[in-house]
Amino acid sequence: MKKEKDILFSIIIATYNRAHIIGKAIESIINQTYNNWELIIVDDGSTDNTKEIVESYSDNRISYFLKKNEERSIARNYGIDKSKGDYISFLDDDDYYLAEFLYVFNNKIASIGETASVLMCFEYHEKDSIKVKNIMSGNLLKPPLRLLWTSQTSIRPFVFQRDVFRSERFKEECKFGQDFHLAIRIALKYKIHIIPDYLSVNVLHQGQGTNLKFLKNYRENAELSIMCINNLLENHFAQLVRVIPKNELFDLVNHKIYGFASAALKHCDFNYFNSLFWKLNLKASIGKTFYYGFSLILRFPYYYLKCIYQNNK
């Protein structure tokens, strides 16, 4: 087992045109109470002044890499290859860690020993500077895999021993949901050690990818998002269903379909709405499937008439 002083953390931030907000994420690493870390910033082809912002921090533990734009999965995999740490974590450029994040993880790793391959803390959601505890942490009775699936986990509250990435990487085809896809695959192979402390913060804002995916290129984003979930089901269904009830597995598929079908209504894209509506999976929970279907049908006349009115103006 490594001594405490030998444990080096690599924090990877993949960024694209976020010069105006990346500073808080960087400063949250600089302000860590545990100091044996490196910060790998992978600039995925930004056209703003991201480079100047990063280079304004004169800390030799920060490394900046500029590459052509290829989306977040490839950028994060690139960061893994550039990292040197014994343990690796991933921070989004619009989120941040609390100052004790690395300190608490380091102590937990030291207490567990060499089997500490995957660790996860709890996190806050923050909106308008107000932090609220993420409800996913409320149900510790669920097995970790089921908890991650039903909460649609991100990768943010995790720390991974670097050997995990010898066989697992972010799926490049997943433009959205790559965090979830990787976390589930890893959870199928490794024990997850849960740290019941709130140490990371997910900042909610209008410019989040989770919001933007329903606006521009929403058809492509829908297909990619649904593909990511279906890919997990196709390749790991037998393992997943041992821990997660079948209806809960398909509830997530329907949740994605519902979100993008709602977006199609707002875009007056009724052909695509119809295509998505008939993809609702009847293997999911009856109650949730009925709610999704009824909600979509109920709203259809309103958006149909609204779109006709707008087109005739």
Image (cartoon, rainbow, N blue to C red):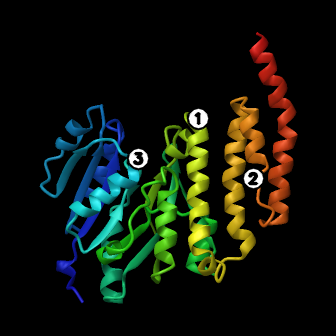
> In the rendering, at what x and y percent does residue 62 appear?
19, 54
> In the rendering, at what x and y percent does residue 164 appear?
35, 76
Tell us which disc is closer to us: 1 or 3: 1
Report, in whole angstroms, how far the alpha carbon at label 1 lies from the one at label 2.
21 Å
Up-down: is 283 above or below 271? below
> In the rendering, at what x and y percent does residue 228 appear?
55, 58
Up-down: is 15 above or below 307? below
Quadrant where the image shows the C terminus: top right
Residue 268 in sight: yes
Tell me where residue 309 sits by quadrant. Answer: top right
Q: Which of pointers 1 and 3 lies earlier in the amino acid sequence?
A: 3
Q: Amino acid at mark 2?
A: Lys
Report, in whole angstroms, how far the alpha carbon at label 1 lies from the one at label 3.
19 Å
Q: Which of pointers 2 and 3 lies earlier in the amino acid sequence?
A: 3
Which residue corresponds to the image point at 49% horizontal and 76% vertical from the top-left? 187
Q: Which residue is mark 1?
A: 215
> Closer to the camera, 246 or 24?
246
Which residue corresponds to the image point at 24% horizontal and 63% vertical from the top-left? 81
Q: Which residue is mark 3?
A: 94
Badge 1 marks a residue whose secondary structure is: loop
How packed is label 1: few (under 14 Cα within 10 Å), some, or many (20 or more)? Answer: some
Badge 3 marks a residue whose secondary structure is: loop
How packed is label 2: few (under 14 Cα within 10 Å), some, or many (20 or more)? Answer: few
> Closer to the camera, 167 or 96?
167
Q: Are marks 1 and 2 in contact (CB under 8 Å)?
A: no
Q: Are marks 1 and 3 in contact (CB under 8 Å)?
A: no
Q: Which of pointers 1 and 2 lies earlier in the amino acid sequence?
A: 1
Up-down: is 139 above or below 130? below
Q: Amino acid at mark 1?
A: Leu
Q: Which residue is mark 2?
A: 279
Which residue corresponds to the image point at 28% horizontal and 58% vertical from the top-left? 79
For the image shown, how many numbered marks are present on the structure? 3
